[in-house]
Amino acid sequence: MTTSRKLLVLGRYDHTEAMRVAAGLTIFGHTVRLVLMTGPVAETPENAIQAETLELADIQPETTIKDQGLPYLNSAALAQAISEATAVISL
C-alpha cells in the first residue's frame, strides 16, 4: 500500500519536464508543489500544454523569480518548502 507524500518539484533547468513530472506525480495521490526557477518560463506550445495539465492536476506553480505573474517564493520560503517536503525532485 502506497502512502501519500508531500513532493516538491524544482524546475531548475527544464521547466517543461518539471511541469510534466509534477502533474504526473499527482496520479499516485501525492501532494505536489512545483517551483519554477532560473529565469522566466518560455512561451512555447509545449509549455502551454503543460500549463493546462497543471491546471487539471490542481497544481499552482510558484517561482523564485520576481514579477513573473506567479506566486513568488523568497529564499526563506523556498527553504521552508524544501524542509516540509518528503522528497525533492530537481529537474
Image: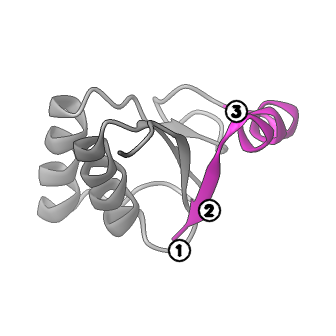
Front residue (pair 54, 40): 54
- Residue wearing tag 3: 73
Q: Quadrant of the N terminus?
A: top left
Give the residue drawn at x 73%, y 34%: 84
On the image, which quarter does residue 44 sit in?
bottom left
Q: Circles 1 and 3: CB distance less than 8 Å?
A: no
Q: Residue 35's quadrant in the figure? A: top right
Name the side, left or right, on which 61 lies relative to 55. right
Residue 39, percent from left and from top: 57, 59
Question: Given the image, on which type of amino acid does mark 2 rest?
Answer: Thr
Q: Residue 81 at x, y = what percent?
A: 71, 36
Q: Does the CB distance between marks 1 and 2 fall below 8 Å?
A: yes
Q: Is residue 4 left or right of 16 when viewed as pictured? A: right
Q: Which mark is residue 38?
A: 2
Numbered range of the magenta stretch: 73-91
What element does badge 2 sit on?
loop
Cα distance in 3D space between marks 1 and 3: 18 Å
Asked if residue 90 is among those painted magenta in the image, a careful observer would answer yes
The residues bearing labels 1 and 2 have C-alpha atoms spaced at a distance of 7 Å
Q: Position of residue 6 (x, y in %)?
A: 55, 37
- The image position of residue 28, as x and y in percent, is 28, 45
The earlier-in-sequence mark between 2 and 3 is: 2
Instruction: Give residue 82's mark.
Output: none
Disc number lying in front (1 or 2): 1
Q: Which residue is mark 1?
A: 13
Q: Earlier in the sequence, mark 1 or mark 2?
A: 1
In this picture, is 62 found above or below 11?
Answer: above
